[in-house]
Image (tube, grey):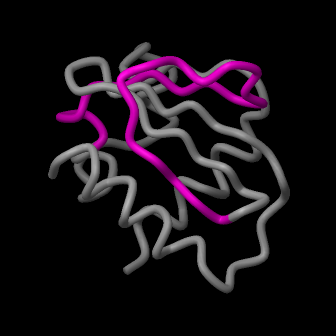
Amino acid sequence: MTLQELADRITHNLQDKDVAEGLIDLHLTDMGHVHVDLASRMATASADNLQGPNSYVEISSDNLKKIRDGQLNPAMALMTRKIKVRGDLELVGKVAKLMKSS
C-alpha cells in the first residue's frame, strides 16, 4: 500500500464517523507521513512532520500491515516498541479501529 493509498483509506473510513477532533501525525518510518485531521475528516500524505499534532505515531509499514491484518497485537507492538505513540493514546486507538474497517 502506498502512502497516498493509506491516506485515502483513512479519509474514506473517517467519513460519517463520530470521532473527537484532533491532529495525528502517522509516521511510517520507511515511507513518510500521513497527517490525519479529524475535524475535517481528511488524511493527507506528506514527506514532512506535522507541526503541533495532538498525537504522534511512529511505525514501519510492515508492522502497520501486520496490525491491520491481525498478525500483530497493537498492545504487544507498544510494549515491544514496534509502534511508538506520543500524545493522546485514546484518540490514536479510535482512529486505528477505523483504519481496519473498510
Q: Find residue 17 and report its image quarter.
A: bottom right
**Image point 53% across, 27% down: which residue?**
57
Can you tell which quarter of the image residue 51 is in? top right
Q: Residue at x 41, y 15 (%)?
A: 80
Front residue (pair 102, 71): 102
Q: Image height check: is 56 above or below 6?
A: above
Q: Tell me where residue 94 appears, x and y as whole percent.
A: 67, 57
- Where residue 24 sits: x, y (%)? 64, 37
Residue 38 is left or right of residue 21, and the answer is left
Give the answer, above or below, for where 81 lies relative to 72. Answer: above
Question: Is 48 left, or right, of 2 in this rendering?
Answer: right
Q: Which residue lies furthest to the top in this view?
A: 81
Find the magenta span and give its range.
41-64
Residue 93 within the segment the image draws in magenta: no
Q: Does 53 appear in magenta?
A: yes
Q: Residue at left 49%, top 33%?
A: 26
**Relative depth, front residue between 13 and 63:** 13
Q: Which residue is drawn at 84% across and 54% down?
A: 21
Instruction: Decide: is 57 above or below 69.
Output: above
Q: In the rendered picture of this protein, how many numbered marks are placed on residues? A: 0
Judged from this view, the residue extending furthest toward the right is 20
9 with respect to 51 (left or right): left
Q: In this view, does 99 lie above or below 91?
A: below
In this orientation, which residue lies closer to the viewer: 94 or 31? 31
Q: In what quadrant of the picture does the C terminus appear?
A: bottom left
Percent of width and height locating residue 71: 23, 49
Q: In this view, does 14 lie to the left or right of 77?
A: right
Q: Where is residue 97 in the image (x, y as percent from the top left)?
A: 54, 62
